[in-house]
Amino acid sequence: MTNFIDSLAVVIVVYNTKLETSESFQSVKGMCRNGTTFDLIVYDNSPKPQQPIELPGLRITYIHDPENSGVSKAYNVAAIHATALGKHWILLLDQDTTMPSAILEAYQREIGRHPEISLFVPVLKLRNGKIFSPCSYRFKRGFYLKTISGGIHSLNKLAPVNSGMLVDLKAFHEVGGYNEKVKLDFSDFQFIERFRKVYKTFYVMDVICEQDFSDDEISFSTQEKRFRYYCEGARNIEKEGSWDWIQYNSFVLLRALRLTIRYGKVSFLRTYFSAFLFRGNTSS
């Protein structure tokens, strides 16, 4: 366990959330067992900085980004910092993931069994029991799986989301890291599309984590802001031709229509036109 811990850096990205109240941070605190000490990088996209935190078992590096550059830049900056520290692995987390305290032992065990694998993930479930990650990845979209078995899986068929991914840092840099133009939505799918061009498989551990993800009670103003990020992500994600653009356009438009019906506001359609359709699109 010691060698793995020494080679590991954990990064948590937070936004307008106190670190102490983050589910991910509470889980990381729970991992500090039996004298375990490891490096934690906190990347804070909030407008105002937080007070430094010192805790036994954690060497915390705090990075404040008041410009809210997004999760992609956060993970890239953390990966560069972890590499400078001489780390071999980086564990990516958002602020809303609950993990079992023994998950580091699970990562270490599977790394020992499968040294050829460069990407390890747990099973993420929502509070309603649905499997959130990995998901079936088709037509540039993720679809819920009914079941998922542990073991080696193809990245051409399945895709994990950001939180919980343990990535070999050499592989992270080799594939080009995250696309910083894709700040939030689609950031994980963009990374996996880059990753699978070099590495064809990943490992799903027999470990269940919980993801706090729901938009049932999100206000109109928050949803409107989220949709703008969604449009920007779809616009800036790397595309390999007109068929990719058609697919992204179709589900951005569908989301705009669903939100318009849900809130009875045409602003979502205006955002679709201004932030996606008429802004130009990135392609590789």
Image: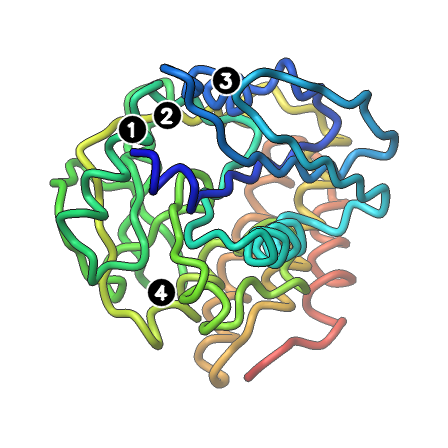
Please indicate whether residue 200 sits to the left or right of residue 99 in the image.
Answer: left
The mark that comes first in sequence, 3 or 4, is 3
**Percent x, y of residue 191:** 47, 62
What is the spatial separation of the Cα atoms under label 1 and label 2, in whole angstroms?
5 Å
Secondary structure under the numbered disc 2 in the rendered image: strand
What is the spatial separation of the Cα atoms under label 4 and label 2, in whole angstroms?
23 Å
**Percent x, y of residue 94:** 54, 35
Crowding around mark 2 (Cα neighbors within 10 Å: few <14, some 14 to 19, many 20+) is some
Q: Amino acid at mark 2?
A: Leu
- Inspect this view and state whether residue 221 appears: yes
- The residue labelled by disc 1 is 130
What is the spatial separation of the Cα atoms under label 3 and label 4, in whole angstroms?
38 Å
Secondary structure under the numbered disc 3 in the rendered image: helix
Please indicate whether residue 83 sits to the left or right of residue 97 in the image.
Answer: right
Residue at horizontal 57 percent and vertical 34 percent from the top: 40
The mark that comes first in sequence, 1 or 4, is 1
The mark that comes first in sequence, 4 or 2, is 2
Numbered badge on residue 139? 4
**Percent x, y of residue 150:** 14, 41
- The residue labelled by disc 2 is 126
